[in-house]
Image: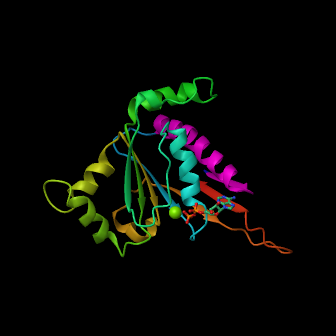
């Protein structure tokens, strides 16, 4: 299934991210056998809105801490705790309650500065016991994790098969270029 959305300002992109966090994960939960992490790959040029989307996405997961464009940070880890469950009046909250019992950790990874897979494996491996790839493997295999990866093409050889791709583009306008317009395609 391909979902195609157009946003005309950054707030709409954040809102879309927030909605996605609740809805796609609920769908994924219903489909999956839940034996691995839920992984999103965010593709698109610099300024495409990937980090902006993730700001809303993390809010949708109930994370209070603000997501920043990680210029130098490659990996940021956030805890999803029950005390952070969003507004109970929210429409999708019944689904979200279920989700929240399942997911405990959110990872935001920005591969822009990485050369290839080796870089991320080394980065993860150093903080984990048992060999260079074990940190990455643990994170990717843990069904309690949600992982969002910017520039996933840089590490394509180690991405899971069931990754959900989200593509960000600035659509060309025939008459004028609207610099605040973004096309966001989600393949589930
Ligand atoms: N419709 C829109 N959606 C997302 N960002 C937008 C939009 N219109 C303008 N912007 C701006 O574009 C920039 C997107 O930056 P960012 O989310 O960091 O992109 P990326 O992570 O893809 O490099 C921000 O400065 C944001 O305010
Ligand atoms: Mg970014």
Is 161 left or right of 181, judged from the image as shown? left
- Position in image of residue 66 (x %, y %): 50, 48
Q: Is residue 105 magenta?
A: no
Residue 161 vs residue 170, the one in the foreground: 170
* Ligand 1 quarter of the rendering: bottom right
Taking the spot 58% from the left edge, 62% from the top edge, the residue there is 167
Q: What stretch of residues is rendered in magenta? A: 2-31
Q: In this rendering, would 188 be left or right of 7?
A: left
Q: How is the image coloured?
A: rainbow
Give how far across and how far down residue 21 sits, in percent.
54, 42
Q: Is residue 124 visible?
A: yes
Tell me if residue 24 is in the magenta stretch: yes
Q: Determine which quarter of the picture holds residue 172.
A: bottom right
The secondary structure making up most of the magenta span is helix
Residue name at image x 47 percent, y 44 percent: 65
Which residue is at a point 54% across and 46% down the rendered structure image? Answer: 57
Compare residues 159 and 180 and report the one nearer the observer. Answer: 180
């Amino acid at each position: 299934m391909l979902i195609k959305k157009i946003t005309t300002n950054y707030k709409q992109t954040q809102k879309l991210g927030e909605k996605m966090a609740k809805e796609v994960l609920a769908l994924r939960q219903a489909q999956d056998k839940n034996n691995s992490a839920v992984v999103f790959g965010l593709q698109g040029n610099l300024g495409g809105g990937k980090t902006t989307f993730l700001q809303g996405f993390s809010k949708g997961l109930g994370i209070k801490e603000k997501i920043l464009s990680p210029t130098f940070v490659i990996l940021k880890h956030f805890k999803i705790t029950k005390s952070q469950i969003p507004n109970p009046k929210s429409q999708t909250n019944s689904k979200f309650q279920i989700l929240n019992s399942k997911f405990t950790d959110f990872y935001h990874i920005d591969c822009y500065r990485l050369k290839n897979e080796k870089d991320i494996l080394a980065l993860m491996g150093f903080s984990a016991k048992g060999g260079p790839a074990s940190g990455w493997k643990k994170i990717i295999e843990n069904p309690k994790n949600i992982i969002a990866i910017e520039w996933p093409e840089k590490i394509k050889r180690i991405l899971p098969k069931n990754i959900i791709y989200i593509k960000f583009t600035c659509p060309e306008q025939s008459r004028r270029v609207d610099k605040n317009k973004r096309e966001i395609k989600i393949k589930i």
